[in-house]
Image: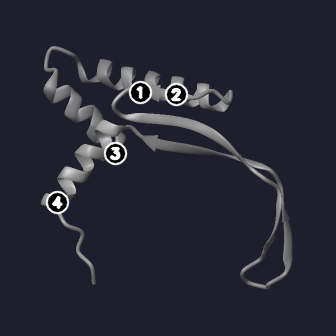
Amino acid sequence: MTKSQLIEHISLRLPHLLQRDVEMAINITIDTMTNHLAQGERIEIRGFGGFSVIQRAARIGRNPKTGEQVSLPIRHSTHFKPGLDLRERVSLSSNRFPLIKD
C-alpha cells in the first residue's frame, strides 16, 4: 500500500472528511514520527509496534566490485518491532494466503 492508497482508503471510510484534510493528517503524522526518530526518540503505537533508532558500529567492509577494503563509518538505522496484535493478525492471514515458492 502506498501513501496515496492509504489516503484514499481513509477518505472512503470517513466520507465526512475532505481528502485534502486526510492527506494533511497523514503527512503531519509521518513528519512528526520522522522528526522524533531523527532526535533519537522511540515511538510506540500500542497493538501495532514500535520504532526505534539503532546505531551501527564503524567497520571495515569490502567493495564488491574490486574486493578492496573500505572503512565504513558509524551510522544510524531505523528498527521496527511489530506488536503482538499485528503479529497475530499477519500470522492468521498468512494461513489464508500462503507464499508461493518457485
Callout 1 secondary element: strand
Pointer 4: residues within 10 angstroms few (<14), some, or many (20+)? Answer: few
Of residues 14 and 62, the one nearer the viewer is 62
Give, as a three-letter code, the residue at label 1.
Ile
Q: Find disc 2 in the rendering and name its residue.
A: 43
> Which-is-in-front pick, marks 1 and 4?
4
The quadrant the C terminus occupies is: bottom left
Of residues 80 and 32, the one nearer the viewer is 80
Q: Distance between the residues labelled 1 and 3?
A: 20 Å
Q: Distance between the residues labelled 1 and 4?
A: 25 Å
Q: How far apart are marks 3 and 4 (CA)?
A: 24 Å
Q: Name the spot of residue 9 as percent of width and height, x first.
A: 20, 34
Q: Are marks 2 and 1 in contact (CB under 8 Å)?
A: yes
Residue drawn 49% across and 43% down? Answer: 80
Mark number displayed over residue 59 = none
Q: Find disc 4 in the rendering and name its residue.
A: 95
Residue 63's place in the image compared with 20, above or below, is below
Instruction: State which tag comes first along the sequence, 2 or 3.
Output: 3
Residue drawn 26% across and 45% down? Answer: 88
Mark number displayed over residue 45 = 1
> Which-is-in-front pick, marks 1 and 3?
1
> Which-is-in-front pick, marks 2 and 3?
2
